[in-house]
Amino acid sequence: MKKLIIMLIIGGLFIGCAGVEIPFVSQDISLAGKIRAGMTTDEVIKIMGEPIISELENNVEEWHYCRTGALLKMTKDTFVALYFLENKLIAKEHYVAIEGYGSCENFIKTGTYKVPSNVQTILDK
């Protein structure tokens, strides 16, 4: 692990010198603290901005926001999943990626991700 970190630091120095930018998603997921059940999708977008990904299944719309962790600080990618039914927020879940390096949009629905029970009941109908 130590050898991998050293190689990434050295590689990062060369990439930085070459002027190559590595894209990482850095959404402010702390804003999710302002999100409340019953809010509309438009109200959520005003606070959180556009989600990194959205999906629709059995009339439940699922949005994901994420912030890429920092390898050198050993922080994990963090996520917020929001669930809407009929344009109203019905659930909010925070989760983290357990493994993987790179931009967080590559690790959506991994790690500690789980569908809230009230949402799963709707999906199972």
Image: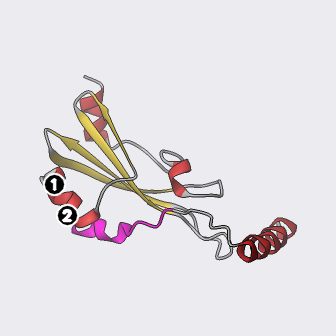
Residue 20 percent location from the top left of the image:
67, 67
Image quarter of the C terminus: top left
Q: Residue at x 30, y 70 (%)?
A: 31
Furthest toward the front, the residue is 18
Give the residue pinned by disc 2: 46
From the viewer's perspective, is 95 left or right of 38?
A: right
Region of the chain picked out in magenta, as a range: 25-34
On the question of residue 29 being in view, the answer is yes
Name the residue type under label 2: Lys
Name the residue type under label 1: Asp
Q: Residue at x 28, y 61 (%)?
A: 49
Q: Quadrant of residue 13?
A: bottom right
On the question of residue 111 being in view, the answer is no
Give the residue pinned by disc 1: 42
From the viewer's perspective, is 37 left or right of 113?
A: left
Assign a secondary structure to mark 1.
Answer: helix
